[in-house]
Image: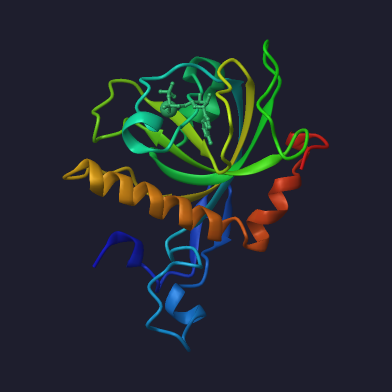
Amino acid sequence: MGKLNQGPEMSNVRCAEATFPLIQPLMEQNSSDSTTTTTTTPPPTVAMVGPYLLASTVAKGFGRGAKLLGCPTANMPLSELGEQAEQLQAGIYSGWAQILDGESGSPKSPAPNTVFKAVTSIGWNPYFDNKEKTVEPHIMHEFQEDFYGCRLKLLVCARLRDEKNFDSMEALIEAIQQDIRDTDACLDEEQYKVLQTHEFFGSGV
Ligand code: ADP
Ligand code: MG
């Protein structure tokens, strides 16, 4: 059985200074429809964390996200992020992101200061065996342009899973797509949704 299906018997998880309830297991929530395979609710092991409030400029990375994986990830340099990013355990996280102006403006958004859903990889990317820890959010919106050099604010509020290695690039790409679906479902839950309007983002929604 996959890791995401483990641990439904737990009802709480200890994170930072507080104890937060785990989201109800999928089977309990959808007990009338046990044949559904598409995840429309978050996986049972999602745990609330932080929230961690991270901000940096967007830097160039290895250029693999869009080209190899079909999923661009904005590189947030550790040197700008400080202690919070160092404390964050490697893994895949859900949260909210806002792109602010850089020297050459900001990418076109549905509205100024929009706060988007984001799925973030934190760690060493075992498949690529990186030597340095990276913090790389994929913002769940299709932009028409890059936004290197822009300021990016990222609120990390839920931990989806551990980092792991994959036997093939196809398996990695499938896991990323599942993480995107899980993030989409997770952030619709009330305890995460309220954080979209956290004061960290100013007046932007
Ligand atoms: P890099 O290795 O430089 O991070 P990627 O292939 O991962 O290269 O692409 C990331 C860049 O793509 C970001 O820095 C940003 O400028 C741009 N980008 C466009 N759309 C998105 C998106 N939805 N999420 C994250 N970055 C995006
Ligand atoms: Mg990237």
Extreme-right residue of the structure: 203
Extreme-bottom residue of the structure: 32
Q: Quadrant of the C terminus?
A: top right
Q: Quadrant of the N terminus?
A: bottom left
Extreme-left residue of the structure: 167
Residue 54 location (% of width, % of height): 60, 30
Which one is nearer the viewer's eye here, 201 or 24? 201
Q: Is residue 65 left or right of residue 186?
A: left
Q: Is residue 129 left or right of residue 44?
A: left
Extreme-top residue of the structure: 103
Q: Residue 65 falls in which quadrant of the image?
A: top left
172 relative to 38, above or below: above
Color theme of the render? rainbow
Q: What residue is at 33 percent from the left and 50 percent from the top? A: 175
Residue 128 location (% of width, % of height): 25, 30
Q: What residue is at 34 percent from the left and 47 percent from the top? A: 162
Q: How many circles with numbers are drawn on the protein?
A: 0
Q: Residue 150 falls in which quadrant of the image?
A: top right
Residue 36 location (% of width, % of height): 41, 78
Q: Is residue 186 left or right of residue 62?
A: right
Q: What residue is at 48 percent from the left and 20 percent from the top? A: 78
205 relative to 36, above or below: above
Which one is nearer the viewer's eye here, 23 or 121? 121
Residue 189 location (% of width, % of height): 62, 62
